[in-house]
Image (cartoon, rainbow, N blue to C red):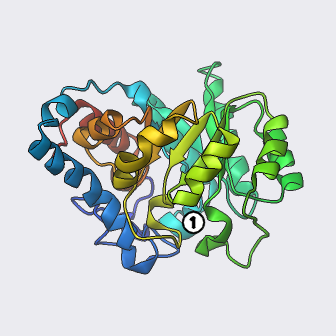
């Protein structure tokens, strides 16, 4: 049984393969913009890289890469009511993070509107800290004006091992006309970094202009992402972007993280081969959680990392 008695209250169709075909037009919801175009391209991108690797002789190198749980995190998710279908926002976070920890993977806390979406996520981590005092999370904040961001940074201080900004979400459809968000400049990012004492991540690297921003600000973490296909941006996959620009980006940051369409152990291995240090997964975990509860999400984590789900 899922988190609530009637699984069909949830918006996720729990497709046998989470490839972007079952939630077209769901925004808010589990889908993306432009008929899930980039959602689908993300999913397909990892396979395309492996097909290329077969041709150029690197496929054995990819598939021999070990996958440790330390290389995987549960992605930042908010909007549990409007995007997933929970009765109340607060019902989502503790089960989601608990399953992640039982599966021995890391946590990402997301941000949203209203502000309680961030605070429910932070509070869920604090509850887990009672049993796991050293537990921390990567906290990704929306690009609010800096004065508001400073308050959020302070609120997350006891939880955050990393502070990041969703630089791509200043015009995200689900928050449009609700709050003031802004495109972050190097000067604004410099102000943010002065307020934190943990590594800083730029999340949403997906265009050439983003690479220029990475070169200028030199973040601790450059997080390649197109928000799971949920923002208006160029067409393409995070896989192809990582493969094409990963080496260049790595010269100007400490680590590269990536998300988008990762569904199998082979996908994780492909991301690691092309230079990612951390691979972030969300939709498959959410689908497992709403269909089969915490145990279902733990099983999904194991299936992906141990390789029970491949191609």
Please give the name of the residue rendered at 28% of the width and 63% of the height, measured from the top-left corner: 19
Please give the name of the residue rendered at 53% of the width and 34% of the height, measured from the top-left corner: 251
From the viewer's perspective, is 156 left or right of 91?
right
Please give the name of the residue rendered at 49% of the width and 46% of the height, measured from the top-left corner: 75
Residue closer to the observer: 153 or 91? 153
From the viewer's perspective, is 50 left or right of 125?
left
Say which element carries label 1. Answer: helix
**Label tally:** 1
Can you give x and y, in whole percent of width and height, for residue 14 in the image? 30, 62
- The image shows residue 80, relative to residue 264, as above or below, that is below
Can you give x and y, in whole percent of width and height, for residue 204 in the image? 56, 54
Q: Residues within 10 Å of mark 1 (few under 14, many from 20)?
A: some
Q: Residue furthest right?
A: 147
Please give the name of the residue rendered at 75% of the width and 56% of the height, measured from the top-left corner: 185
Q: Can the viewer see residue 296 in this picture?
A: yes
- The image shows residue 251, relative to residue 217, as above or below, that is above
Can you give x and y, in whole percent of width and height, for residue 107 in the image? 54, 36
From the viewer's perspective, is 210 left or right of 235?
right
- The image shows residue 200, relative to residue 170, as above or below, that is above
Residue closer to the observer: 96 or 249? 249
From the viewer's perspective, is 57 left or right of 116?
left
Residue that badge 1 annotates: 81
Q: Can the viewer see residue 99 in this picture?
A: no
Residue closer to the observer: 9 or 103? 103
């Amino acid at each position: 049984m899922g988190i609530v008695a009637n699984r069909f209250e949830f918006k996720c169709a729990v497709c046998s393969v989470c490839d972007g075909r079952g939630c077209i037009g769901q925004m808010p919801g589990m889908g993306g913009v432009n008929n899930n175009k980039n959602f689908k391209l993300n999913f397909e991108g990892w396979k395309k890289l492996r097909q290329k690797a077969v041709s150029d002789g690197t496929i054995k190198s990819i598939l021999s890469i070990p996958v440790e749980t330390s290389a995987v995190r549960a992605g930042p998710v908010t909007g549990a009511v409007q995007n997933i279908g929970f009765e109340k926002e607060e019902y989502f976070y503790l089960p989601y993070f608990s399953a992640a920890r039982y599966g021995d993977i890391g946590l990402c806390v997301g941000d949203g509107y209203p502000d309680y979406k961030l605070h429910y996520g932070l509070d869920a981590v604090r509850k887990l800290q009672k049993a796991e005092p050293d537990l921390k999370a990567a906290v990704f904040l929306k690009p609010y004006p800096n004065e508001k961001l400073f308050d959020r940074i302070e609120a997350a201080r006891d939880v955050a091992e990393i502070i990041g900004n969703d630089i791509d979400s200043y015009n995200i459809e689900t928050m449009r006309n609700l709050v003031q968000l802004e495109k972050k400049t190097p000067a604004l990012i410099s102000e943010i970094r002065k307020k934190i004492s943990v590594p800083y991540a730029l999340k949403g690297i997906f265009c050439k202009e983003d690479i220029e921003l990475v070169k200028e600000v030199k973040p601790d973490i450059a997080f390649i992402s197109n928000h799971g296909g949920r923002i208006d941006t160029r067409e393409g996959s995070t896989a192809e972007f990582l493969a094409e620009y990963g080496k260049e980006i790595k010269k100007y940051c400490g680590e590269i993280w990536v998300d988008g369409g990762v569904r199998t152990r082979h996908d994780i291995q492909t991301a690691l081969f092309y230079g990612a240090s951390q691979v972030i997964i969300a939709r498959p975990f959410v689908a497992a959680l709403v269909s089969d509860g915490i145990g279902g999400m733990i099983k999904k984590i194991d299936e992906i990392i141990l390789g029970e789900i491949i191609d």
